């Protein structure tokens, strides 16, 4: 397996993890998330970003990453903004 293929696989796993997290966080649009994610790569980009942001938030909350100047609050806001973006995306791509 080439390094590029491995990278794509990591991105795919991050997108899938992000999608699952969003489906748990936003149960009212769970079915729509699944359908849109199957058709639109741009939603998967948001899912990947959500996975990365929530992973960092988890590390900050557990104290496994240093909170430099309010990073914890910043990542809470980032996660919330991505959730809002995903809801808007789903409303626009019904």
Image: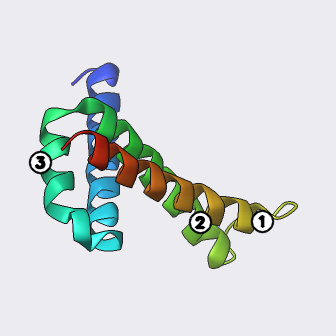
Local secondary structure at mark 2: helix
Q: Are marks 3 and 1 in contact (CB under 8 Å)?
A: no
Local secondary structure at mark 3: helix
Pair 1/2: label in front: 2
User: Which quarter of the figure is the C terminus placed in?
Assistant: top left
3 with respect to 68 (left or right):
left
Pair 3/1: label in front: 3
At a point 64% along the width and 76% down the height, the residue shown is 61
User: Which quarter of the figure is the N terminus placed in?
Assistant: top left
Q: What residue is disc 3 on?
A: 35
42 with respect to 80 (left or right):
left
Q: Position of residue 80 (x, y in %)?
A: 54, 62
Q: Position of residue 74 (x, y in %)?
A: 72, 59
At a point 59% along the width and 66% down the height, the residue shown is 57
Pair 3/2: label in front: 3
Corner quadrant of residue 44: top left
Q: Which mark is residue 6?
A: none
The correct choice, above or below, for 5 with respect to 65 in the image is above
Whole-angstrom CA distance, mark 1 to mark 2, is: 11 Å
Q: Position of residue 77 (x, y in %)?
A: 64, 61
Q: Position of residue 24 (x, y in %)?
A: 29, 72
Corner quadrant of residue 93: top left
Q: Residue furthest right?
A: 69
Q: What residue is disc 1 on?
A: 66
Q: Residue furthest bottom?
A: 62
Q: What residue is disc 2 on?
A: 57
Comes first in the chain, label 3 or label 2: 3
Comes first in the chain, label 3 or label 1: 3
Local secondary structure at mark 1: loop
């Amino acid at each position: 397996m080439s390094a590029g293929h491995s990278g794509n696989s990591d991105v795919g796993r991050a997108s899938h993890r992000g999608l699952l997290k969003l489906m748990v966080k936003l149960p009212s649009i769970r079915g729509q998330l699944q359908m849109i994610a199957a058709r639109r790569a741009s939603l998967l980009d948001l899912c990947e970003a959500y996975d990365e942001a929530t992973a960092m938030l988890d590390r900050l909350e557990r104290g496994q990453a240093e909170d430099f100047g309010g990073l914890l609050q910043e990542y809470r806001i980032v996660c919330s903004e991505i959730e809002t973006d995903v809801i808007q995306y789903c409303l626009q791509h019904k």
